[in-house]
Amino acid sequence: GWGSSAPSSPSPSSDAPDEPASTPSASDPAPPELQLRGRLDQATHLRLRGAELTQSRFAAELHLRLRTPHARVVLAGRLEVDPAAWQRGVDPATREAHGWWLRPLDAFLEVGEGAVSVRVGWQRLSWGEATLLPTLQVDPQDRRTPGLAFDHARPIRRLATALSFRAGRHDLAFTGVHEARFDRKAPPLGAFSPFRAPALRALGPLAGAALSADVRWEDRPHRWAGQSQQLYVRHRYRGRRAELALHAASLLDPLGEVRPPSPDALGDALAGARLDLV
């Protein structure tokens, strides 16, 4: 519901504070509430050794929120542009990952009536029982620049449908996530990758051949594939002296793997063709 006191699974979360879902009296209906705000960010990172510019990211966000007695609409998006990715000599894979990115933030419709609420759209998920932070992180993350990304922009929202019920001391919630959990990562051997230097040192005499290949991450299965669908279920009992919660989920392992190419594919990669890592 809209009035839960702590983030729990699988309730979606938004950066806007929620309000109780109680319906105002007919004699004094609450007027619709509309909010519109924007945000601009800029981050520049300069590698001291060699005075190399590794990030000069500009970002703009727009947030619109409309609240009525029975519904809430949130529309928010973020556009990032990084001129550093367009420097001469930057490989195409790095330019594709860092050059620009337009994505939704919290963008959903939520409808509530009494003890029932439904939310559909792009949203964050809180998993576990905690007061301030979720116990487990189930949202994909922006990992292109580990430790340097804006905290509020690091989680990636996914398309999901959430349905919750409240009956007395019992809360029951179902959340279906319709996208696979794939982090956004820099190409393994890209110009801005944190793994580039140690990987080239480990490759030794093969480093030159590796740099000539277009090595990228490849997400499998497809983000919208049937097996990418995930289900989160939560039941909570609020007793007078204690609370009990049961959480269950069915989701894909997001760790991935590195598949060695066949001899023919390896030859093509060393000749400058594209090589995908799963």
Image: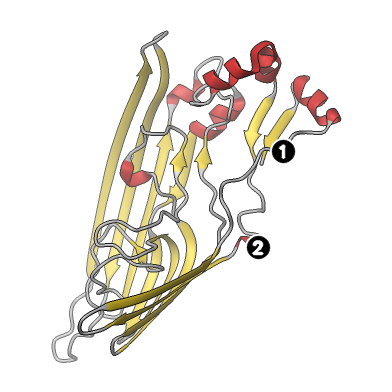
In the rendered structure, which disc, 1 or 2, sits on the residue that comes first in sequence? 2
Binning the other alpha carbons within 10 Å of mark 2 as few (below 14), some (14 to 19) or many (20 upward) gives some
Q: Residue furthest top?
A: 50
Q: Residue furthest left?
A: 28
Q: Residue furthest right?
A: 264
Residue 275 on image: x %, y %: 71, 31
Image quadrant containing the N terminus:
bottom left
Residue 115 on image: x %, y %: 32, 86
Q: Residue 259, which numbered label?
A: 1
Q: Residue 211, which numbered label?
A: none
Binning the other alpha carbons within 10 Å of mark 1 as few (below 14), some (14 to 19) or many (20 upward) gives few
| C-alpha separation, residue under disc 1 versus residue under disc 2 | 20 Å
Residue 187 on image: x %, y %: 57, 31
- Would you identify the image quadrant in which residue 119 lies? bottom left
Residue 229 on image: x %, y %: 59, 64
Image quadrant containing the C terminus:
top right
- Taking the spot 29% from the left edge, 39% from the top edge, the residue there is 40
- Taking the spot 74% from the left edge, 21% from the top edge, the residue there is 272
Q: Amino acid at mark 1?
A: Arg
Residue nearest the observer in this picture, 185 or 29? 185
- Would you identify the image quadrant in which residue 32 lies? bottom left
Residue nearest the observer in this picture, 73 or 196? 196
Q: How is the image coloured?
A: secondary structure
- Taking the spot 33% from the left edge, 77% from the top edge, the residue there is 244
- Would you identify the image quadrant in which residue 130 lies? bottom left
- Judged left or right of residue 79, residue 205 is right
Q: Nearer the viewer, mark 1 or mark 2?
A: 1
Q: Amino acid at mark 2?
A: Gln
Identify whether 127 is placed above or below 234: above
- Taking the spot 66% from the left edge, 60% from the top edge, the residue there is 225
Which residue does the numbered mark 2 point to in the structure image?
227
Asked whether the residues under the numbered discs 1 and 2 touch, taking CB atoms below 8 Å apart as contact, a structural biologist would say no
